[in-house]
Amino acid sequence: MPTEVIRHGRIRWTNITRATRDDVEALQAEYPQFHPLDLEDLLSRIERPKIDEYDDYLFTVMHFPLWDSVEKLSRASEVDTFIGSNYVVTIHDGVLSPLANLFERCQDDEAERANFMGQGPSHLFHTVVDHLVDYIFPILYKVDANIRGLEEEIFTSNFKAVIQNLALIRRDNIALRRIVRPQLEILEILERTEHHVIRDELDVYFGDIRDHLNKATDLISDHKEVIEGLVDTTNTLAAHRTNQIVQILTVISVIMLPLTLISGIYGMNVDLPLHNDPRAFVVIIILMIFVASIMLFVFKERNWL
C-alpha cells in the first residue's frame, strides 16, 4: 500500500501501512536524521516495545491487541512512530481500526484535521495513542462477558466444551497481559520526558492514558483471578465425576464377584445339588438375582450408591 501523507499548516502526518524495503528507503531519503537502527526496526515482524530519544525526534514502538477470530487469541499488532518538531510518521500493518479510522477522518474532514493536527505533532501523537488504548477495553469487556458465560455453563452437562472454552479464555488473558503491561513503561517515560518535541502540558494527558492502561491491567488481573477460580472449580468437578464413575464401576465389580463364584461352582464337572434337576437353571438365576438384590440393598443402606 503506498505511503499516505496529510498536511495541516506546518504539520505533516505520514502514514505507512505494511512497510516494505522501498518504503523504508524512501523514508530515509526524506528524513535523513532517522537512525538506521530505527529504520531497520520497521521491517522487523515484532519488535519489543521501546522509546528512543534523539536530539531531533522520538521513536516509539508500541503493541496493541488485535483479536484473531480463527485462533481465538489476541495477538500483538505493532505501531511504530516517529515524532519530530513538525511531523509524525506512523508505520503499522493496517489492521488496527482506530488508527486507520483516525487517519481517514483527518484525511476527509478539514475540521477533524484542524482538531487533531492543529495543536502540534505531540498532540497528534497523544491522540493516536489515546485512541489505540481505548480500543483495548472492548476486547477486555468481551473477555469478561465470556468468563461470565462460563460461570453459568460450568455446571451443565457439556463439561468438555466448558473446559475447552476455559482453556482458550485463559490463554487469551495471558496473551493480553503480555501485550498490555509493557506499554505502561512507555507511557511513564512519555509522562516525565522533557524532550522538546513533547509539549510540557501533555504530561498530564499521557498520565491519563497511563491510568487507563493501569485500569486495563487491573481488569486483566481480575480476569486472571476469576479464571483460576473457575479452573479450580472445574478440577474439583472433574475429580468428583471421576470418583462417581469409579464408585459405580466398583459396585458393579463387587456385585459380579459372588455371581461369578456361583456360576463357576455350578460350571464344575462334579455332582452338585440340583445336578440333574431340570429346574436347576431357573433356581440358579433366581439365586443370583437374590444375591445381587441383597448387595444392592446393603449398598443403598450405607449410602454407597
Image: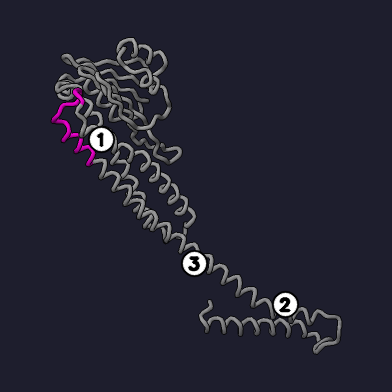
Q: Is residue 201 magenta?
A: yes
Task: Give the CA separation, mark 1 to mark 2.
Answer: 75 Å
Residue at point 35% right, 15% down?
2
Between discs 1 and 2, the one toward the N terminus: 1
Foreground mark, 1 or 3? 1
Q: Is residue 69 magenta?
A: no
Residue at point 35% right, 25% down?
92
Would you say the residues marked 1 and 3 are in contact, meaning their CB atoms lie under 8 Å apart? Answer: no
28 and 260: which is toward the camera: 28
Foreground mark, 3 or 2? 3
| Residues packed near mark 1 inside 10 Å, few (<14), some (14 to 19) or many (20 plus) | many
Between discs 1 and 3, the one toward the N terminus: 1
x and y percent of residue 279 in the render? Answer: 77, 85
Task: Give the CA separation, mark 1 to mark 3.
Answer: 48 Å
Count of numbered labels shown in the rendering = 3
Task: Give the CA separation, mark 3 to mark 2.
Answer: 30 Å
What span is colored magenta in the figure? 195-211
Tag 1: residue type?
A: Leu
| Residues packed near mark 3 inside 10 Å, few (<14), some (14 to 19) or many (20 plus) | few
Residue at point 44% right, 59% down?
234
Tag 2: residue type?
A: Thr
The kind of secondary structure element at disc 2 is helix
In which image quadrant can residue 193 be found? top left
On residue 304, the disc is none
Residue at point 20% right, 37% down?
207
Residue at the spot of label 1: 187
Residue at the far right: name it.
270
Residue at the spot of label 2: 260
Would you say the residues marked 1 and 2 are in contact, meaning their CB atoms lie under 8 Å apart? Answer: no
Residue at the spot of label 3: 240
254 and 82: which is toward the camera: 82
Foreground mark, 1 or 2? 1
